Amino acid sequence: MNRAELKARARESMAWAKPSPVWVTVVYMLLPLLLGGVSSVSAAINSAVLGEGFSGLSVRTIWLLILTVAVGLLYAIIEAGYLRYCLDVSRNKPASFGTLFEFVNRPLRFIGLSLLISLAVLAAVIPAVIALALLSLISGFLGVVAYIALFV
């Protein structure tokens, strides 16, 4: 399958989809602005509560931190819904604006799956980082040995 065929299939899927993927994308892109507004308001309140210096964690500060984390999780869940909408459109399945919020009623399932994916990625990355660190140490040691040999 070449690029032209893929583009034609994508256009056909997008033309078939109701509501239009363009409008769903616009709504999806406006949601972070709304959620970011909530985070900005919470940051402004936080700075007003703390004043110039950091005087320790207050109940309001902890509450605002929880609110910011909740907003981040909500956006991640909506992002998963948007990806689901895109998959449904590409598979010529019915999709709607409601697909954006499909995972909102199952947040623990989504968060658990995200944590498992993160752990799997971390398990794959840590051996590579350790190998690169060892390689760097060995090459540094060999460089010092070569420098001493040249000096002698």
Image: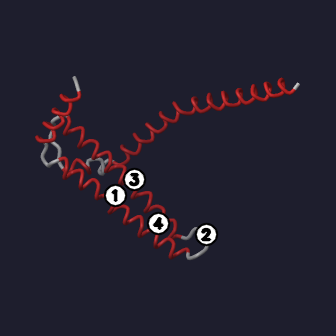
Q: Seen in the image, is 39 located left or right of residue 132? A: left
Is 34 displayed left or right of 42 in the figure?
left
- Residue corresponding to mark 3: 73
Residue 94 placement (x, y as % from top left): 14, 41
Res 64 label: 4
Quadrant location of the N terminus in the rendered image: top left
- The image quadrant where one finds the C terminus is top right
> Circles 3 and 2: CB distance less than 8 Å?
no
15 over 135 or under it: above or below:
below
Q: Residues within 10 Å of mark 2 (few under 14, many from 20)?
A: few
Q: In the structure shown, which secondary structural element does the residue marked by tag 4 occupy?
A: helix
Q: Going 29% across and 50% down the picture, which residue do you hit?
A: 105
Residues tagged 4 and 3 counted as in contact (Cβ below 8 A): no
The residue labelled by disc 2 is 56
Q: On screen, 145 above or below 63?
A: above
Secondary structure of residue under mark 1: helix
Mark 4–mark 3 Cα distance, whole angstroms, equals: 14 Å
Of 8 and 147, nearer the camera is 147
Type of amino acid under label 1: Pro
Provide the residue designation for mark 1.
32
Tell me which amino acid carries mark 2. Gly
**Residue positioned 55% across, 70% down in the render:** 58
